[in-house]
Image (spheres, rainbow, N blue to C red):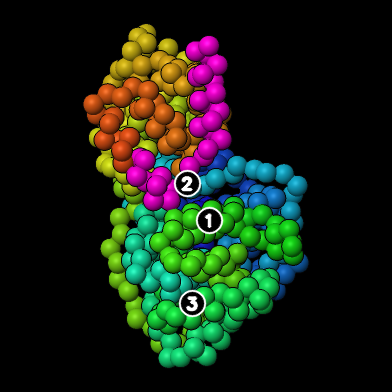
């Protein structure tokens, strides 16, 4: 999002807003950057106006295509509609993030963050920095369900339904969509054959997935999003059970990268469509809206960093769209816990935030420090750590309090309906517990 702030500053230079420079100065001050001040920024823009964009000037990225250096050049390239910009890959993995949470912690208010987010969405749509999902005819009765599920995790930009007149038009379109891919022709023909008896209707969804987590594809060394791979795996596993005579990949197709997205949208451009409006509540946004500001206040008041605690309890159930949460329970690292409270029991530290008793996962043979530091036991959203659903499930099975019984039932139902299950974590914990009991 720091690139978006630079983009807004360029817009103010050209008189398109009156706040871009102030946002830029505020961001750079927090980052301790004095080199790129407004005067230098303006000089760089003037240089581009006079000499054009220097196409040999590259940006630096890591192995997952995460930007390390070159946000100014990237902002210039986006603003001046440069189609290509050279990159240099540094053989390392980084964790440089300037997301919403960074801007909140840097003192940006809700109005400023909203300006940045709206411009980010505008850039994503205009520049085609999004992914395209095609839902195939065998799941057309589940089009709305899949769309809503996607919308609960990602930002949906558009939803369009296409109906084709005959088999030839339908087959030609499928082949056109895959023309940029490296899939073998026989697989495409087989896909078409298995979909022949269905109504010739597809749904095309454009959406923003946040960090794509690119890797180099083994076959052709081109970028493929690991997040896209996870999405396809999840929905294929869930909905393949609902289709008679299922053949691999007749549920959903998503392009590997932005180049694929551009090609897919060009392929569909010549066809008429019906724009679909679906109301979707993004569960992550819903949870963040309810509790984010309070969590930020707690971290500031008690000098906690996001690496000092892990969120447990019903927050995970809400994020997984299982049920609403009523509060935020956190496990805090021992040293930090002692700075806040002397008790080993649960204690409330704000209206909705509670530190749970020490040893939250002791029944699973996992201590608090390991829960917080070992990434196999938690996942992250915007820098916050959340205990994995598998651990919460095992914890509830162990406790079997009256309030846990319904949660256990709902979690098991979600797993039966296709929610991914990490069997290795389950087996590891079961083995640990059994070994301790011997």
Which residue lies at the image location 37% right of the left edge and 46% below the top edge?
Answer: 414
Q: Residue furthest top?
A: 342
Q: Is residue 232 magenta?
A: no
Q: Which residue is mark 2?
A: 420
Say whether marks 1 and 2 touch (CB < 8 Å).
yes
- Real-space Cα separation, disc 3 to disc 1, in angstroms: 20 Å
Q: Which residue is mark 3?
A: 195
Which residue lies at the image location 51% right of the left edge and 69% below the top edge?
Answer: 250
- Real-space Cα separation, disc 1 to disc 2, in angstroms: 9 Å
Q: Secondary structure at mark 2?
A: loop
Q: Is residue 420 magenta?
A: yes
Q: Is residue 380 visible?
A: yes
Q: Position of residue 102 (x, y in %)?
A: 47, 42
Q: Is residue 268 above or below residue 61?
A: below
Q: Is residue 21 above or below residue 79?
A: above
Q: Secondary structure at mark 1?
A: helix
Q: Position of residue 346 (x, y in %)?
A: 32, 17
Q: Which residue is mark 1?
A: 233
The magenta region covers 411-438
User: Image quarter for residue 79?
Assistant: bottom right
Q: Which mark is residue 330?
A: none
Left or right, 428 with respect to 413, comes to right
Observer-nearest of 307 and 44: 307
Left or right, 60 with respect to 414, comes to right
Q: Residues within 10 Å of mark 1 (few under 14, many from 20)?
A: some
Which residue lies at the image location 70% right of the left edge and 59% below the top edge?
Answer: 217
Q: Position of residue 221 (x, y in %)?
A: 74, 61
Q: Residues within 10 Å of mark 3 (few under 14, many from 20)?
A: many
């Amino acid at each position: 999002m720091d690139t978006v702030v630079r983009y807004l500053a360029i817009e103010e230079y050209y008189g398109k807003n009156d706040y871009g420079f102030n946002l830029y100065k505020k961001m750079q001050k927090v980052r301790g950057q004095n080199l790129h001040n407004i005067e230098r920024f303006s000089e760089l823009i003037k240089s581009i106006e006079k000499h054009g964009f220097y196409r040999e000037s590259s940006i630096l990225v890591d192995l997952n295509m995460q930007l390390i250096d070159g946000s100014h050049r990237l902002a210039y390239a986006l603003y001046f509609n440069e189609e290509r910009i050279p990159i240099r890959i540094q053989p390392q993995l980084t964790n440089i993030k300037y997301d919403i949470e960074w801007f909140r912690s840097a003192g940006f208010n809700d109005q400023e963050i909203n300006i940045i987010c709206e411009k980010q969405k505008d850039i994503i749509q205009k520049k085609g920095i999004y992914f395209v999902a095609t839902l195939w005819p065998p799941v057309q009765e589940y089009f709305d369900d899949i769309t809503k599920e996607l919308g609960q995790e990602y930002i949906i930009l558009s939803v369009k339904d296409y109906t084709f007149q005959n088999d030839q038009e339908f087959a030609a379109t499928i082949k056109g969509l895959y023309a940029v891919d490296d899939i073998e022709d026989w697989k495409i023909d087989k896909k078409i054959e298995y979909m022949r008896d269905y109504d010739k209707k597809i749904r095309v969804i454009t959406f923003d997935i946040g960090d794509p987590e690119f890797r180099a594809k083994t076959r052709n060394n081109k970028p493929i999003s690991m997040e896209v791979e996870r999405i396809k795996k999840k929905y294929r596993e869930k909905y393949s059970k609902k289709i008679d005579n299922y053949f691999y990949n007749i549920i959903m197709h998503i392009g590997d990268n932005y180049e694929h997205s551009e090609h897919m949208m060009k392929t569909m451009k010549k066809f008429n469509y019906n724009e679909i409006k679906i109301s979707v509540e993004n569960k992550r946004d819903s949870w963040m809206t309810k509790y984010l500001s309070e969590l930020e206040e707690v971290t500031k008041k008690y000098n906690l960093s996001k690496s000092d605690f892990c969120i447990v309890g019903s927050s995970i159930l809400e994020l997984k769209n299982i049920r609403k949460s009523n509060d935020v329970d956190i496990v805090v690292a021992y040293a930090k816990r002692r700075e806040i409270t002397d008790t080993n029991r649960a204690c409330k530290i704000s209206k909705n935030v509670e530190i749970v008793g020490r040893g939250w996962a002791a029944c699973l043979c996992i201590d608090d420090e390991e829960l917080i530091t070992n990434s196999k036991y938690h996942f992250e959203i915007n820098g916050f750590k959340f205990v994995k659903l598998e651990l919460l499930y095992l914890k509830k099975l162990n406790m079997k309090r009256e309030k846990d019984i319904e949660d256990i039932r709902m979690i098991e139902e979600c797993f039966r309906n296709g929610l991914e299950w990490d069997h290795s974590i389950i087996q590891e914990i079961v083995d640990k517990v059994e070994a301790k009991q011997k």
